């Protein structure tokens, strides 16, 4: 069984943090810090463990933020070349940076320039994507100015922070309501990073745009339409990942930007192999389509399963299926098995469901089937 994720914060990590803090401040109460940071540690999940370490830092580091920050800065390990490095004898890096960044967020708001120096140094050893948000919320203009100054930084972790830290709906993190309402300051930064030489940075740009698309789909569709012009393979990959939600939703502008125009089809047929499907079994179906065009067509074929809900209504879930090139006046027949396996994220209810085919954002065909929890006894 894999090690629980929460154990990234353990007594060994805390002991080593204490060692480094004491090395750079002889008065540091190492034993008190360890006892406070480790209190009932086994009962806490990852974020709660990080928060408890931050609280222990607040209790045992100097109340003078400039002095405390200097201790943190001196305790850092050399800059890393990857994001998996852990705390070691040379200094602190990896996940131990997370509570340190939060400490800066809680105590450094009145020391903006020094805090930016600290977070830049910390992100070079892990990430400051969570802690930079304290400053984006309290002083957005000053923080954005700092981020702009880092756009050409040699360290890819610093450049990624510019994008990842400004994601309006970053998982695990505080949301940024100002950027949810008006993402234009963020987009200005993403414009500068879209052709970054590191995929690590470009993927963050894509994830940021996907966040923005949840609130401003037309804006992101316009960006995709503009960025795709003369795009190389790297930028095309970025845009596709950025528009994954819009592609699933069948956004016509995005589909058109990727060459998926309105399909010209006829004699379409969706055939279910059985109208009765059992839990832990498969829904099997075949789609037959025929081109009504004298030209080749690029098709993105997806399907929706309309799941039965407890109250008798249905809830749609889009699933990616395949991409296909359909020659002029030709036919395509393709089949699919969709599993109805028990999973923790969905409750299945007996009753009538529907499967619906979407091609290039257009609804093509729909059929009903009945889901039952238990197969018949043989």
Image (spheres, rainbow, N blue to C red):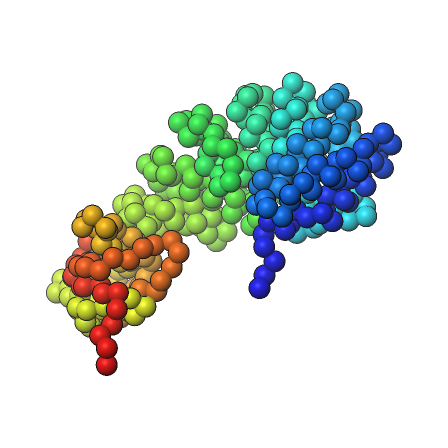
Tell me the quarter of the picture where residue 24 sits: top right
Q: Position of residue 214 (x, y in %)?
A: 37, 39
Instruction: Say whether residue 97 is visible.
Output: no
Image quadrant where one finds the N terminus = bottom right
**Depth check, front residue: 151 or 374:** 374
Measured along the vertical axis of the image, is residue 344 above or below residue 16?
A: below
Give the left or right position of residue 290, taking residue 166 as reference. left
Give the left or right position of residue 89, taking residue 316 as reference. right
Instruction: Say whether residue 244 is visible.
Output: yes
Give the left or right position of residue 244, taking residue 32 as reference. left
- The residue positioned farthest toward the right in the image shown: 26
Image quadrant where one finds the C terminus = bottom left
**Depth check, front residue: 88 or 370:** 370
**Depth check, front residue: 111 or 320:** 111
- The residue positioned farthest toward the bottom in the image shown: 378
Q: Position of residue 240 (x, y in %)?
A: 41, 50
Q: Residue at x 66, y 24 (%)?
A: 107
- The residue positioned farthest toward the top in the image shown: 110
- The residue positioned farthest toward the left in the image shown: 267
Q: Residue at x 71, y 47 (%)?
A: 11
Q: Residue at x 77, y 25 (%)?
A: 62
Q: Position of residue 301 (x, y in %)?
A: 28, 59
Measured along the vertical axis of the image, is residue 139 above or below residue 193?
A: above
Q: Residue at x 34, y 38 (%)?
A: 217
Q: Position of residue 47 (x, y in %)?
A: 57, 41
Tell me the quarter of the picture where residue 279 sits: bottom left
């Amino acid at each position: 069984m894999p090690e629980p994720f929460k154990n990234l914060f353990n007594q060994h990590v805390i002991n080593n943090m204490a060692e480094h803090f004491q090395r750079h401040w002889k008065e540091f109460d190492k034993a008190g810090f360890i006892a406070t940071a480790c209190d009932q540690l086994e009962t806490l999940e990852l974020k709660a463990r990080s928060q408890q370490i931050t609280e222990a830092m607040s209790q045992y580091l100097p109340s003078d933020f400039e002095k405390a920050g200097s201790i943190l800065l001196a305790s850092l390990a050399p800059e890393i070349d990857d994001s998996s490095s852990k705390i070691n004898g040379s200094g602190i890096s990896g996940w131990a940076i997370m509570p340190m960044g939060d400490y800066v967020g809680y105590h450094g708001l009145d020391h903006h320039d020094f805090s930016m120096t600290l977070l830049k140094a910390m992100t070079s050893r892990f990430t400051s994507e969570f802690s930079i948000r304290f400053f984006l919320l309290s002083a957005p203009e000053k923080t954005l100015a700092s981020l702009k100054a880092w756009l050409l930084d040699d360290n890819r972790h610093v450049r990624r922070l510019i994008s990842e830290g400004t994601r309006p709906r970053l998982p695990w993190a505080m949301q940024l309501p100002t950027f949810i309402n008006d993402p234009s300051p963020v987009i200005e930064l993403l414009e500068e990073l879209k052709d970054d030489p590191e995929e690590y940075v470009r993927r963050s740009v894509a994830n940021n745009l996907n966040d923005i698309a949840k609130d401003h789909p037309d804006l992101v569709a316009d960006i995709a339409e503009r960025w795709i012009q003369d795009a190389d393979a790297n930028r095309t990959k970025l845009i596709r990942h950025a528009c994954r939600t819009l592609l699933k939703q069948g956004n016509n502008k995005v589909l058109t930007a990727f060459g998926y125009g309105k399909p010209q089809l006829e004699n379409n047929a969706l055939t279910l192999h059985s109208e009765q499907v059992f839990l832990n079994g498969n829904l099997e179906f075949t789609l037959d389509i025929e081109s009504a065009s004298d030209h080749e067509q690029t098709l993105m074929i997806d399907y929706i399963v309309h799941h039965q809900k407890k109250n008798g209504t249905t809830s749609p879930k889009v699933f990616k299926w395949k991409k296909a090139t359909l020659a002029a006046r030709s036919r395509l027949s393709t089949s699919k098995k969709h599993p109805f396996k028990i999973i923790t994220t969905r409750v299945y209810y007996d009753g009538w469901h529907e499967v619906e085919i979407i091609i290039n954002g257009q609804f093509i065909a729909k059929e009903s089937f009945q889901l039952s929890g238990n197969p018949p006894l043989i």
